[in-house]
Image (tube, grey):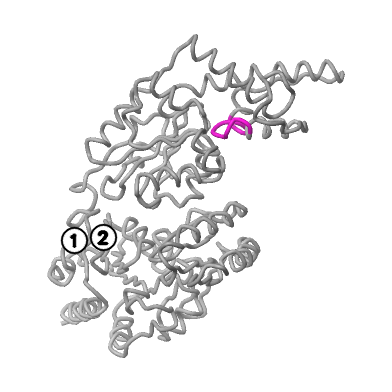
Amino acid sequence: MKSVSDSDIDLEMIDAVIFDMDGVVTDTATVHAMAWKQLFDEYLKKRAEKHGEKFKPFDADSDYRRYVDGKPRYDGVRSFLESRGISLPTGSPDDNPGEETIYGLGKRKNGYFLDRLERDGVTVYQSTVDFINGLRDEGVHTAVISSSRNCEEVLRAAGVRELFEVKVDGVDSAELGIKGKPDPDIFLEAARRLSVEPGRAVIVEDALAGVQAGRKGGFGLVIGVDRTGHGDELVKQGADIVVRDLSELKLLHADKAGKVNGAGRIMKDVPSALEKREAIFRYFEAGTPAVFLDYDGTLTPIVAHPAQAVLSDDMRSVLERLKRKFKVVILSGRDLADVQDMVGIEGIVYAGSHGFDVAGPGGYHDDEKGREFLAALDKAERELQNSLKGIPGARVERKRFAIAVHFRQVDSADVGALEKEFDRVLSGHPQLRKSAGKKIFELVPDIDWNKGRALLSLVEKLYEDSEKVVPLYIGDDTTDEDAFRAIRDRGIGIVVGDEERKTAACYRLQDTDEVRAFLEALLEMAKRGEQ
């Protein structure tokens, strides 16, 4: 369970929050659990008597969480029965509640749920309502999802339907062919209807399957709500933050979000690092500067094909001089060997594949974190190559610890189909998760690892007195935002470009020419310090 201090929500880094209904907004999870128990206990007791078996009742806590919570009704029936080694025919949607089929039992459970709901009414979590109102006051979009076909009725009975701009429920899932959790489809559909990128959206879930779905969908933050004392399981399934109640969350405003000049502004509104260079250099006086640099879009301009991103002679000269004054790390999404070849300077630390594969002076090499995922990546690569070959312009690039699908040259009308195929392949590989950058989707190992964690890990490994290190990170992509967030309380993040998106960086540089000019100024600062 993370502490309240770990539960700050930076409003400048999000555009939307998507809430699960049962157990997060409404206290209907208990009603569902008891309806499931009524259904399965009746069925299991009857089956035990018929076959002379020992009756083992449905556990409304552990069985509910593991097998049915958050899943579409009929998937829940099948999942629990399979856990007991029971196989029933699927039947058809026309089956009546008395039939021993998946559809029949599912309909019977729904009848029990509606009976209890009519008798006991709907309770809402007031702390959740207060949290949602706080988000709406700040202009953050809100959506609600549920695998239940009764979602609309429950929300209206609870008086909270108007809190949400978008609702995606079991009825929508059936109409659209949306897969149930732990597939991320229902959350991705909600984000699509809100017109927000998954990376700019937060998921709030209490179900293990829902947390898994949020993680697989590449959402910016997954919050687990633990009302039953199983927070550790939510963390294992991928929750970034776990709270017992949404009242523990704090909405952090821009003026409090960053240590230097705030954070989370539109890129073009972030102050120039060249104009503020003296203030930045004074910040370095508090410790030991360490220079971390992205490659594509930072040291070289973005080009149509990665092989064309050649380092200029002027930039190479700057890096050669920079390594003599500071520890320099190139932290790139490229493969390790690729970025080493593109830069070709000895004495620099190279971190490829977003930090999964690292090499440095003296024969240092570390690739331990990603090795166990290589087989899954190999299989997913073959599937992507086959499934995307019919989409003109799509390019699958295998990196050692990632698979990149480039769609810069794909017609905009085909991008949706490409992403659908990408997500389909992803759904078959629970060891992997989705990541996204500029005109690119990636499959990467599903562990809590990104450029920010890689940067902090390298600081620990490269410096004996790591607490005194002041990291400088310069990058241009959305994947670099993890690094900006990781160091904003102890270093300097500088974003490159002028896109209409928000960034956690404290300062900005217009292009690679300004990056070179800033690094030249950094060298001048170091020279002055030696005099």
Q: Which mark is residue 270?
A: 1
Question: Which amino acid is tagged 2?
Answer: Ala
Magenta run includes residue 447: no
256, above or below 432, in the image: above
Q: Which mark is residue 505?
A: 2
121, above or below 439, in the image: above
State the residue at coordinates (64%, 28%): 63
Residue 519 in the image, given as x and y percentages of width and height? 24, 78
Residue 429 in the image, given as x and y percentages of width and height? 61, 54
Magenta segment = 65-74
Q: Count the labels in the image.
A: 2
User: In what element is the residue under mark 1?
Assistant: loop
Secondary structure mainly formed by the magenta segment = helix
Q: Residue furthest top?
A: 119
- Is 480 displayed left or right of 350 in the figure? left
State the residue at coordinates (50%, 74%): 335
**Mark 2–mark 1 contact, CB under 8 Å?**
yes
**Mark 2: few, some, or many residues within 10 Å (few <14, many ≥20)?**
many
Question: Which amino acid is tagged 1?
Answer: Val
- Sequence-wise first label, 2 or 1: 1
Q: CA distance from mark 2 to mark 1?
A: 8 Å
User: In what element is the residue under mark 2?
Assistant: loop
The quarter of the picture where the C terminus appears is bottom left
